[in-house]
Image: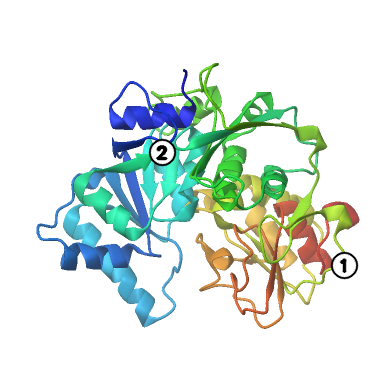
Amino acid sequence: MGMTIAEKIIARAAGVPEVKAGEIHTVTLDRMMSNDGTTHLTIDMYHNKLRHPHIADPSKVVFIVDHNIPAENPKTAAVHKKMRDFARENGIAMYEGKGVCHQLMVENYVCPGELIFGADSHTCSYGALGAFGTGVGCTDFLYGMVTGGSWVMVPETLRFNLHGKLREGVYPRDLILTIIGDIGANGANYKCMEFAGDGAHGLSVNDRFVLCNLAVEAGAKTGIVEPDEKVKEYVESRGRKAEHLFTSDPDAKFLKVYDYDLDKIEPVVACPDFVDNITPLRELPHVDIDEAFLGSCNNGRIDELRVAASILKGRKVKDCVRFIVSPASNEVYLQALREGIIDTLLEAGAMVMNANCSVCWGSCQGVIGENEVLVSTGTRNFKGRAGHKTSKVYLASAAVVTASAVAGYITGPESL
């Protein structure tokens, strides 16, 4: 029996010729990433719980401060200092104020075929480059950091064959939200969501990032787009090697296979308070908003900023709306500056923040108040996710978020 992409990656990491879904294997990790959400807890356990603390391979570990940056209070400042000191003492790469962790990992580290643990649920983003990225808790991260390995139960794979091309005004964000709405927030629990077909290969690396990033919102262990020449070119253009462009064998076993015609996908909105509560934009009743957010690890790249600028050109953000934009990384920010996108955003009345998790995290920037409504390109819309427990979060594409910021209610750019 052949193997899926996920199975091939785990087999490589386990040093065995083949694996099957449901098996548990000891694996060597290619890379580990932890951000300021839980790294301080990992460091405390390292110092207080281990008899002989050590780092197996510091070159495989990356610390990133992105959730609360710059620090907004002394408690957060202490967390950052703890990370900074530990990284310096142990020779660990540390990024602070450079962007969102997953964006930085894809820009600087991830290679096809790697098995990567991240102390953040959206580590599944790395499947955009054909890697197996998965989120773990700080205890599992500590074990991986000090031993260099861990264990993994091989997930079953759900195959999503994508056909054709998205219509103008429809985005990968609409596609993945539609899929989550179809299979449900528990529809891929501990499964790998594998995306393939001519429709998948027609997507850019940035577009693939969008699909894999939200796989966890369907409960998936990881999401992977079948790697191709686009992945190879992206990785090698950044001075890395693309040695393991794994694809599923013709006789690989999939738990279920789905087929999606991309030209049938339409703009959608995820309504409060669940990511799988999907409504076509054309069917959404009138919803006034208080705030709009463009950013996060799902939708803060140059593609989305270009969309926003094209809509805002010659227009103004509604007086009653706060439109917050946070590029996914400084690299993205600089590109937007060169293209004049930042000028357009500011002239229209948007607030452009530093590259960080920002509003999506709901902790340090743009927190929404009692009964306020946010339309966001963030990753989640759970109750209280972005502020007060009575507030409401709607998820949509960069185009819908930007158009809504201009209109003052949730709508698409065609209505402006």
Residue 190 in picture, x, y percent from top left: 49, 45
Residue 254 in picture, x, y percent from top left: 56, 28
Mark in the foreground, 2 or 1: 1
Question: Where is 13 relative to 148, above or below?
Answer: above
Along the line of sight, which residue is nearer the eye, 109 or 395?
395
Give the numbered dot on residue 110: 2
Residue name at image x 44 percent, y 35 percent: 131
Question: Where is 229 relative to 317, above or below?
Answer: above
Which residue has dot 1 on it?
286
Residue 260 in picture, x, y percent from top left: 73, 33
Residue name at image x 66 percent, y 53 percent: 341
Residue 148 in picture, x, y percent from top left: 23, 43
Q: Earlier in the sequence, mark 2 or mark 1?
A: 2
Question: Where is 37 relative to 321, above or below?
Answer: above
| Amino acid type at image mark 2 | Val
Question: Where is 130 relative to 350, above or below?
Answer: above
Instruction: Find numbered disc 2 in the image and state the secondary structure of the residue it sits on.
Output: loop
Q: Is residue 132 left or right of residue 361?
A: left
Q: Is residue 170 left or right of residue 282?
A: left
Q: Residues within 10 Å of mark 1 (few under 14, many from 20)?
A: few
Residue name at image x 47 percent, y 18 percent: 2
Give the numbered dot on residue 340: none
| Amino acid type at image mark 1 | His
Instruction: Find numbered disc 1 in the image and state the secondary structure of the residue it sits on.
Output: loop
- Between the C-alphas of marks 2 and 1, the distance is 42 Å
Q: Residues within 10 Å of mark 2 (few under 14, many from 20)?
A: many
